[in-house]
Structure formats: structure tokens, C-alpha cells
Image (tube, rainbow, N blue to C red):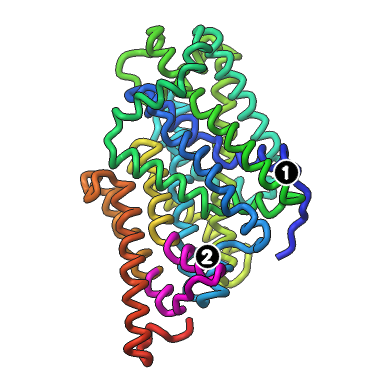
Amino acid sequence: MAFERRLDTFSLAALLVSAHYGLGFLLGTAEKSLTLGTAGSLYAVSLGLGTIALLGLAKFYWTQTEQIWTLLGSAYGDGVKLFVGLMSWSSLIGIEAVQLISGAFILKVFGIPTLPTMVVLAILFATISLLPTEKAGWILRGLLVLNFLALLYGLWVLHAFGDYLRSPIEFAGSVQHISLPSAVGISLSTILLVLIDMKYQQFLVQAKDVQSLYKGCALAAIILLLLAFLPSTLVVAAHNAGILPPGIDGKETLPFILSWIGGGSQKPLGIALIVSLLVPALGIGSSILRVQTKTVLDFNILPASVWSRVLVTAANALFGLAVAFKGGEIVNLIVSFYAAYVGAVFVPFVTYLLAQTGRYNFSKGSVKLSLIVSSFLVICLLILTLTNSDLALFGSIELNIMGTGILSGILFLFIGEVLEKYFPTSKVGEKA
């Protein structure tokens, strides 16, 4: 696959940051911070730490250039390629649902009910995704910069810059208020997701040289860590200042604070600041749908046609809408889908790396068996936890899904090796 190597350090860093600095990052952190204080930044901090860890794989991705499902499919067969692509597609459903939920709660500040809003937004996401809107990406990122400046202005109005500077120290102490399984589940799922996430890989391969690659990753990690404490500090400061109404939903906190900064949801500035959040939701949501549709069509499951694209886009939008209707906390929802992807794909990816370094070559049948079983289990667990959030064998939903996937993946990887050794005629060893 040919890529134009054109991104310098700052361009690469900007794209890596924009891949995750969106509504899940902002509203999810704000929602958590309403009850957890600075510890609500755990998800955002984990994205920064994951980007630091990505330095270890950055050159590998830059050299290989191919997507993960193509790499694994080339090594272990088309069946593996299909399942990795399926898991990548399914992980995007959670991100799509988060955009719908976030957009609905942004408009709730204007008194608009959430459920009808989600339906309308899903239709808008699907419509925009079918249009050639990629060139408008710089406008959407510009609106997120506007939002970033609004957060800084909010810190100034609330005299909270000192709180922001102290926030990393307070975070280290307050994170103990999160249960250990939840902290591990959220942080580890997010960090590992960054390591095998196509949203990052697509930009890494475009770095103009290795030096820009490493510097860009390092700079992106620093920026994400700096941004991680902005929403939480603002929410804590607003809470302490008494500007948040009693009983406010955590998802509404950031839109409410922005409207307050702008003089109210009826004032031009207040409306502009709220729109600075809503418009990127349209961009991110439609972009995710476009990627999902492309992923499905790239596997040639349906004949290439305009109607196939429309059908797949509509189906993807309905899946996201169904999850959005279920609701839940933004961070937990998005990380649950991360955990499913990591739980299924991480073990096959590690076996691929082991083979590339010449340490050990697992058979194609073993890797395929591992991936199929772990994918089936994590999808079943994800569906069950979406309907019953009390299912948490390891103490947290995220750790439950990821742990089950990785442990079953390891177990069936070795079962496959045993079957290959002692039953060489087994279908497990057949070529995909």
C-alpha cells in the first residue's frame, strides 16, 4: 500500500491528537469529574500514556504501512483478516453511539429532548457520511480549537489556572477513589487500544521520516496529557463556584458551563460555544460511519454499488443508535467497545510480532482458533453487559470483557498448538 510520506512533527502530532480529542474525551471526562473530581481524567490520561507506549511500535507501523487486518490476514489467512476487520468495525459502533449521546446532551441545554435528537443526529450522520465531506475536516478541527480556547477562558473566569497546574498532583492522589478493577480496566483497555488502533496507524504511516515519526508521537502524548486535565479542572472549579444546578446530569456539565461562560443558552456567544461542540459531533460521527462502511465494503461481502453503500451506512447508523438508546456513562461505554477489540485482537497481534522477531511461529490454525473463540466471547459479553451492567466477573465491565478475551485467546492459542502437534490432520490446521 503506497502512502505519501509528507507529515512533519507538528502535522503528525496535530492529527494524532485530533483522533482522540473529541466529544468522548471532553464530555466523558467532564461527566466522570462531576463525581470523581480530578480522577475523572483517567481515560484522557490513559490516551496520553498509550501514545507514549506507541513509540515502541511506531517504526513497525511506519515500515509495514498495511492495516492490521491485512498484516494478520497475510500471515494467517483470510479468515483471520475477516475477523480482525469485523472486530475493528464493531469497536467503532461504541464511538458512533458516544457521538449520538454527546450531541443529544449538548442540545439538551436548549431544552430539546434527547431521544428524538439521537434519531435526527443518526440520520444526519448517515447523510453526511455519504457525501464527499473529507475536505471539511480542517473546519471541524478548528471548531475543537475554538472549544479548547473556550475551556481556557472558563478557567480564567473561574480563577482556576492554579487548580489546573496542581491537577496532575491531585489526580495521582484522587485516582485511588476509583476501584482498582475499574481503574485497571479503563486504563489498560485504552492504552492497549492505542497500540493497535487504526485511527492512529493511518497517520503514523504518513510521517515523512523516522525522526518526525518519533517526535510527532512524543509531542502528541504531551499535548494529550496537558489537555486531559482541562475538562476535569473546569468541572471541579464550576462545582466549587456553585454555578452547576443541583441534579445536573454529568453529560450536561460541559455544555452548561460553556453556555454559562457565554452568558446563557439564549445569548449569541453562549449559542456559538455550544455549537462549537455540536458541529464536530457531526463531523466525527459521519467520519466514523464512513470508515465503518468502507471496512465492510472492502471485504466484498456485498456487490460494489451505490445501494450497497447506502444499505451498509443505514445499518451501521442503526447499530450506533441502538447502543445510544441504551445509554450509560460515556467513558465506560466507549471503553467497553475498546475492551472487546483489544480482548479479541491483542493475542493474535502479539503472536504476529513474535513471528516477525523470529522468537516463535504459531501455526495459522492456532491463531485462527484463538481469534474466533475470543471474538465470539467478547462480543457475547459486550452484548450481555449492554443489557445487564451488573455482569463484572473481574470487578469491572471493561476488565471483564478484555480479560476474558485475552485469557481465552491465550488458552485456545495453545490448545490449537497441541491439536496441530498431536492431531495434524485436524481441521484446525487447515488453511483459511
The image position of residue 25, as x and y in percent, is: 49, 34
Q: Which residue is mark 2?
A: 353
- Residue 429 or residue 391, whichever sits in front: 429
Q: Please say whether residue 249 is visible from this viewpoint.
A: no
The image position of residue 404, as x and y in percent, is: 30, 58
- Quarter of the image containing the N terminus? bottom right
- Residue 60 or residue 6, whichever sits in front: 60
Q: Is residue 24 magenta?
A: no
| Number of numbered callouts drawn | 2
- The amino acid pointed to by label 1 is Lys
CA gap between label 1 and label 2 equals 36 Å
The structure residue drawn at horizontal position 70% and vertical position 37%, both measured from the top left corner, is 138
Q: Residue lying farthest front?
A: 359
Q: Quadrant of residue 214?
A: top right
- The amino acid pointed to by label 2 is Leu
Q: Which residue is mark 1?
A: 135
The image position of residue 128, as x and y in percent, is: 61, 45
Magenta span: helix, strand or loop, mainly?
Answer: helix
Give the crowd class for mark 2: few <14, some 14-19, many >=20 residues within 10 Å. Answer: some
Region rendered in magenta: 346-370
Q: Is residue 363 magenta?
A: yes
Is 421 on the left-hand or right-hand side of 44?
A: left
Q: Is residue 379 above or below residue 266?
A: below
